[in-house]
């Protein structure tokens, strides 16, 4: 147990991920919510927007200088892509003490920032105060591909389907419930940000085709892998089980996992290992809650690691629980 309480602020807290972050911080024994910045909700009580937080804190509309002046130990940036730089620059100018975790894509390609996908990069963390949180789709893709990386014969093809919460709260076709009803909406079918992200961090080209479905939360990622040597499905499953045996937020299952069973849960299910005749084509399925392990839960893992706290502090158990 830590003897210190760390202050943490959230910038961009109006969105779905911000609400999940507030819930995780409220249940953390070593973190205290110092501020929550939201232009749209300024002046409203944080407690009125969720049952997890019990304090009297109110949302504020804070510009970059005001965020830096708060002097929080940790600042989590939950802003849309392209909006974070002024806040990071202001925090940089105020001194190196504050830990910054950015949930956008703004720094995922910046080598000066630690890329925080703990199951893969935990061993690379060397005390950096600037952490880039991986994307939701990108987390599912990388964890599904990584154990077979050395056997690949070509680019993995990834067919991703997300609930519409992944499109954020700003109105668009991708979160319009009427347009999504009885529908599956493809978009950004080449050169998606997460395609570039995964290709960069795995070091191999990856092909990604995203879609939005009518459900609210959760991602299904079906990954087609062409391999250099033939394999058997039981060998593949054993390899995944060995790779993730020590990872409390990754569960390897025999059947293809269902997105309905991952919603509201804090880890990743990987399974459905299917090998085509000849043994050189493998299909793997991963499911993840885009708002949790795809965003807020992973951010909390990164905060805990950086502060030297137990990695799963405030994160509910995943592997030991059963599907409902």
Image: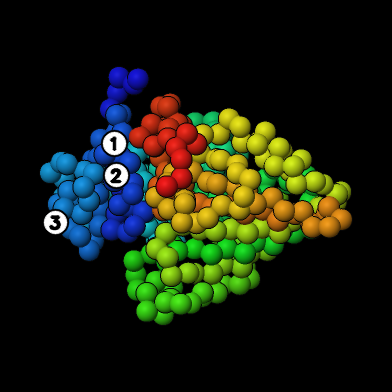
How much space separates mark 2 and mark 1, taking CA atoms? 7 Å
Q: Which mark is residue 114?
A: none
* Distance between mark 3 and mark 2 Cα atoms: 19 Å
Is residue 139 left or right of 275 when viewed as pictured?
left
**Which residue sits at x=49%, y=63%?**
162
Residues packed near mark 1 inside 10 Å, few (<14), some (14 to 19) or many (20 plus): some
Helix, strand or loop for disc 1: loop
Q: Are marks 2 and 1 in contact (CB under 8 Å)?
A: yes
Q: Residue 202 or 92: which is nearer the viewer? A: 202
- Quarter of image, res 237: top right
Relative to 139, is 36 on the left or the right? Answer: left
Percent position of residue 238, x then y: 71, 37
In percent of the image, x 65 and y 52: which residue is there? Answer: 272
Q: Earlier in the sequence, mark 3 or mark 2?
A: 2
Front position among marks 3 and 1: 1
Residue 27 marker? 1
Q: Position of residue 18 (x, y in %)?
A: 32, 52
Mark 3 highlights which residue? 43
- Tag 3's secondary structure? loop
Identify the residue at horizontal 39%, vertical 37% (top origin): 316
Give neighbour class at mark 2: few <14, some 14-19, many 20+ (Cα, 10 Å). Answer: some
Quadrant housing the N terminus: top left
| Quadrant position of residue 171 | bottom left
Q: Is residue 267 visible?
A: yes
Count of number-bearing discs? 3
Q: Earlier in the sequence, mark 3 or mark 1?
A: 1
Q: CA distance from mark 3 to mark 1?
A: 23 Å
> Which label was assigned to residue 23?
2
Circle nearer the viewer, 3 or 2: 2
The one of 226 and 298 positioned closer to us in this rendering: 226
């Amino acid at each position: 147990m830590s003897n210190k309480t760390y202050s943490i602020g959230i910038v961009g807290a109006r969105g779905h991920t911000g609400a999940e972050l507030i819930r995780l911080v409220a249940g953390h024994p070593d973190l205290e919510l110092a501020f929550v910045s939201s232009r749209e909700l300024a002046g409203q009580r944080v407690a009125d927007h969720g049952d997890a937080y019990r304090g009297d804190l109110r949302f504020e509309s804070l510009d970059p200088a005001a965020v830096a002046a708060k002097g929080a130990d940790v600042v989590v940036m939950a802003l849309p892509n392209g909006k974070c730089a002024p806040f990071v620059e202001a925090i940089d100018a105020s001194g190196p003490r504050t830990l910054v975790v950015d949930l956008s894509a703004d720094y995922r390609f910046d080598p000066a920032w630690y890329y925080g996908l703990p199951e893969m990069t935990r061993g690379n963390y060397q005390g950096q105060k600037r952490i880039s949180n991986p994307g939701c789709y990108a987390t599912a893709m990388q964890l599904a591909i990584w154990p077979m990386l050395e056997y690949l014969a070509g680019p993995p093809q990834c067919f991703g389907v997300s609930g519409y919460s992944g499109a954020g709260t700003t109105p668009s076709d991708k979160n319009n419930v009427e347009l999504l009803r009885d529908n599956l909406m493809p978009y950004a079918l080449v050169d998606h940000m997460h395609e570039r992200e995964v290709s960069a961090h795995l070091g191999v080209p990856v092909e990604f085709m995203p879609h939005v479905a009518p459900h609210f939360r959760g991602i299904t990622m079906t990954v087609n892998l062409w391999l250099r040597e033939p394999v058997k499905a039981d060998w593949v499953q054993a390899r995944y089980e060995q790779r993730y045996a020590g990872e409390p937020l990754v569960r390897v299952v025999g059947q293809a996992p269902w997105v309905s069973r991952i919603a509201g849960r804090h880890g990743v299910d990987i399974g459905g290992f299917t090998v085509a005749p000849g043994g050189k084509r493998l299909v793997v399925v991963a499911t993840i809650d885009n708002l949790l392990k795809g965003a807020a839960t992973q951010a909390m893992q990164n905060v805990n690691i950086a502060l030297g706290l137990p990695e799963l502090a405030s994160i509910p158990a995943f592997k030991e629980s059963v599907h409902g």
